[in-house]
Amino acid sequence: MSIIDYVCDMRYLKYDWFTLLKLPAVWIMGVRVCYLDALSCKVRVRHRWINQNPYRSMFWAVQGMASELSTGILLAKKVKETGRNISMLVTHNRASFTKKARGKIIFTCQQGHEIDELLRRAIATGEGQTLWMHSNGIDEMGDTVSSFSFEWSVKLKN
């Protein structure tokens, strides 16, 4: 582990605890939040024996876990910042795979501004709102290995 990975781990340790306690399969597979700000979230996962398929690459479901976490953590952060009681749920998803996932894969979602607008509409109307959020998995060579889209639904609770 490099010093950069170590610092990254320490800064986002609370998300590791969250996955350990609430999403243990994510934690066991090695999925880790490595960057989060108001606009984007990055989640990394390394191909290991525990998360591989029979073809010696990362199992598609592990890639799905990492990509969904990159969209969900960003949305959850924004929901918490509103101070309102808002539910969130994935209603649909799509995925495409373009290369075997080996080594370290970083899944990135960069839709913070769109989430702000989504939550503004949900609070203003009191009605459920949806947003397609996208996450691309990039390997250490800079190649896209997979792309996921999740339709998130949010609704203000009474």
Image (spheres, rainbow, N blue to C red):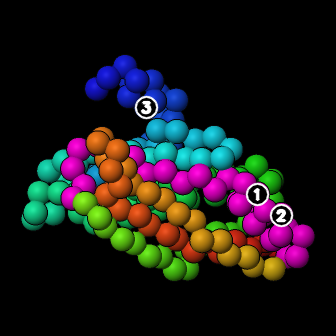
Q: Where does label 3 land, which residue?
A: 9
Earlier residue among tags 2 and 3: 3
Closer to us: mark 2 or mark 3? Answer: 2
Point out the frontmost of discs 1 and 3: 1
Q: Callout 1, which amino acid?
A: Asp
Element type where label 1 sits in the image: helix
Marks 1 and 3 sit apart, C-alpha to C-alpha, by 27 Å
Measuring from the top left, give residue 49's x and y in whole percent.
Answer: 14, 50
Res. 22 in view: no
Residue 15 tag number: none
Quickly name the residue at label 1. 116
Q: Secondary structure at mark 3?
A: helix
State the residue at coordinates (63%, 40%).
37
Mark 1 Cα within 10 Å, few/some/many (few <14, many 20+)? some
Label whose residue precedes the other's in the sequence (1 or 3): 3
Hey, which residue is sitting farthest top in the picture?
3
Specify the quadrant of the image occupied by residue 7. Answer: top left
- Residue 104: quarter of image: top left
Residue hosting label 2: 120
